[in-house]
Image: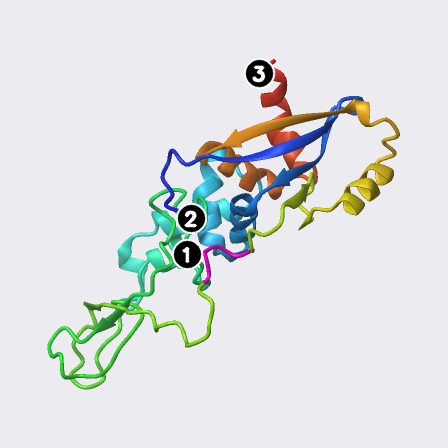
Amino acid sequence: MTTTSDTKLSMKLFIDTNAGKVLFAEAEKDCVDFLFHILSLPLGTLISLIKEKGMSGSFPNLYESVENLKETYIQSNQCKDILLKPESSVGISAVPFLLLNDNVATLKKTFYGCSSSTSHSTVSDGPNARCTSCNSSLSRKLNYVAPPVENGAVAATGGFVKDVVTYMVMDDLVVKPMSTISCIALLNKFNVRDVGVLEEEVVSFGMEEALELLKTSFESKTVLTSVFMSRVRGAK
């Protein structure tokens, strides 16, 4: 799916009204793709996304140190964006919130050729390398064409997981396929004897909530409760 700042995802929360917390959420493929995609984001990208939200710890200081370091101190064959805006090595396309903002790489492969001659075969994945034939910069952007799908192969629909099932997302972001047995086991685990205390609430979330989920996942094991319960109560 194409993602913009207006993109919204949704999940159905199952809330224990006695305990005042989210037990789990029922989520479709798009939500799970977003959550799993977080694992592919380089650390520099993660920090750039959530440092403005008051990320705790010292990693933001490292990020800001690179930001504030003058080019005078950077090696001539290096670029600050390698650390500040690193590209993910996972080539997953069509993932919800793939572009959370302009700092996130588009995951498209980019290669560069010799700026002086098209006949020189040296290629790099960064524009700061030098041609081995003439020592010119490899700054000429080349067009990457993905190979065709092999005969008999089934084209993927995009994202990471299949959409043939519904998924269960726990409060601590454990994700598994949803089934009646897994729901019953979870209710027993949390000692919920009366299903009448469970309340279903569908919540939609966009970029702001996505960043909050990302930040909270580093700080808490009750992520869904922390991010959504105040919104659910405020809407009533």
10 Å crowding of disc 2: few (<14), some (14-19), many (20+): many
Residue ID for mark 2: 98
Which residue is painted at 77% across and 41% down in the image?
A: 183
Amino acid type for the residue under numbered disc 1: Ser
Secondary structure mainly formed by the magenta segment: loop
**Residue range corresponding to the magenta coloring:** 156-161
Residue 88 at least partly seen: yes
Q: Residue 14: give x, y in percent of width and height.
A: 70, 31
Label 3, label 2: how far apart the Cα atoms are:
28 Å
Q: Is residue 167 left or right of residue 189?
A: left
Residue 107 got which mark?
A: none
Residue 54 at least partly seen: no
Position above or below: 37 against 143 = above
Label 1, label 3: how far apart the Cα atoms are:
34 Å
Quadrant assignment, res 118: bottom left
Quadrant assignment, res 184: top right
Residue ID for mark 3: 235
Residue ID for mark 1: 93
Q: Residue 41: give x, y in percent of width and height.
A: 48, 54
Q: SS at mark 1? A: loop
Q: Residue 127: give x, y in percent of width and height.
A: 25, 67
Kindly indicate whether the residue at mark 2 contacts the one at mark 3 (C-beta within 8 angstroms): no
Nearest to viewer (mark 1 / mark 2): 1
Q: Earlier in the sequence, mark 3 or mark 2?
A: 2
Kindly indicate whether the residue at mark 2 contacts the one at mark 1 (C-beta within 8 angstroms): yes
Kindly indicate whether the residue at mark 3 contacts the one at mark 1 (C-beta within 8 angstroms): no
